[in-house]
Image (cartoon, rainbow, N blue to C red):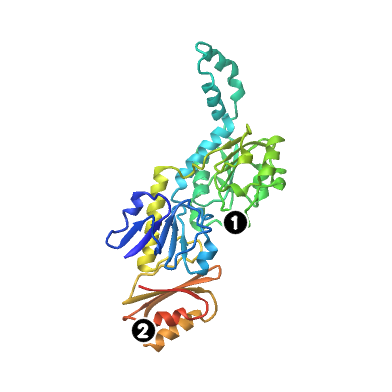
Amino acid sequence: MFTIQKLNKISSKGLDLMPRDDYEVASELSNPDAILVRSFKMLDMELPPKLKAVARAGAGVNNIPVQKCTEKGIVVFNTPGANANGVKELVLASLFISSRRINKGINWTQALKGKGDEVPKLVEKNKSEFAGPEIFGKKLGVIGLGAIGAMVANAVTVLGMEVMGYDPFISVDAAWGLSRNVVKATNLDQLIASSDYITIHVPLNNKTKAMFNKDKFDIMKKGIRIINLARGGLVLNKDLIEAVENGTVGCYVTDFPEDELLGYDNIITIPHLGASTPESEENCAIMAVRQLRSFLEKGNIENSINFPECTLEKRGHTRITVAHDNVPNMVGQITTILASSSLNIADMLNRHKNGIGYSIIDIESPMPDQIAGKIKSIEGVKMVRIL
């Protein structure tokens, strides 16, 4: 029986994938095998001793202590692409509201309540205050061509926009899925300087924090419109506000409101609605649970933030999984312990990522209890599981 603690409301479409005979799922568990989470901030949370995995039903993991989990051999999963369509649709909406001043016009007309027959005349007299350009024929710069960025790039080409994309780490699969009409930028500054609109789709980390600052705003076209539904920290707010006030940025749309961004006509703050669709929540929950089950039941790792991709069809009687530092002779030490106990290896796989190694070893016979302890005693080993 595996115990799963959910720290947020998780769609039943995902929870129903865990058989009740094999899984206990509850919000209050003192020492769970795994945690399911959405936005709950785990950064100051004491990690339970038995915890093996954290599954984030979403893409961002800024609310999870990833480094602490890695040190303890806890695998952190996310669900890239599961909410991509929901975010893509909000980007499209943001393109329109950043251009046509639709939201301001709606708010203004609502304030006309009670003026009776004057309303139509007032609308015709004042509608020019809310005019704005069409997006057709304009150039959109897409920064980050992962699941969301690629979907956005493809969608806006159909709407008649010119699209330039930039992503130095684009995957082969993402590249194959891009429209041939998407032009590759040679560098970030080229994209920034030539775009009429920019949409940002990169993770927040030490390299990307405040990547949009005065230096970047200074090379933009006058009146550029920027859409940031990725993370608030990607943009340095004080420099953005200056760029809005001097007219460099014609409109900034963000899904991450902060107090200092409120009250500006040309800053549109959306209350973090990017993935707030029932379809996104269901897709993320289903993907998170499937990954969690594959790991807990079979030791396989897919879509982990801190551990390498490592999946192996089970061959043999017993499966051993080991999380460890990626150092020379680590696998040799493990297999030596198995050989000294006359345990024959049926199959094995070792992968590494960012200094962390993960090994799956299938052996042909039952394994003595003391073997796990011997492997765990190897310097650099973080976690051992017997399945």
Above or below residue 117? Residue 278 is below
Q: Is residue 9 visible?
A: yes
Q: Between tags 2 and 1, which lies in front?
A: 1
Give percent across and percent down for residue 47. Answer: 47, 63
Q: Is residue 136 visible?
A: no
The residue sitting at 40% across, 87% down in the picture is: 339
Which corner quadrant holds the N terminus?
bottom left
Label drawn at residue 344: 2
Q: Amino acid at mark 1?
A: Asn
Residue at the disc numbered 1: 205
Give percent across and percent down for residue 112. Answer: 53, 18
Looking at this view, is 281 or 185 the one in front?
A: 281
Label 1 packing within 10 angstroms: few (<14), some (14-19), many (20+): few
Whichever of callouts 2 and 1 sits on the residue coming sooner in the sequence is 1
Above or below residue 130? Residue 234 is below
Give percent across and percent down for residue 229. Answer: 54, 44
The answer to whether residue 284 is left or right of residue 42 is left
Number of callouts in the render?
2
Above or below residue 30? Residue 122 is above
The residue sitting at 53% across, 12% down in the picture is: 118
Label 2 packing within 10 angstroms: few (<14), some (14-19), many (20+): some
Q: Amino acid at mark 2?
A: Asn
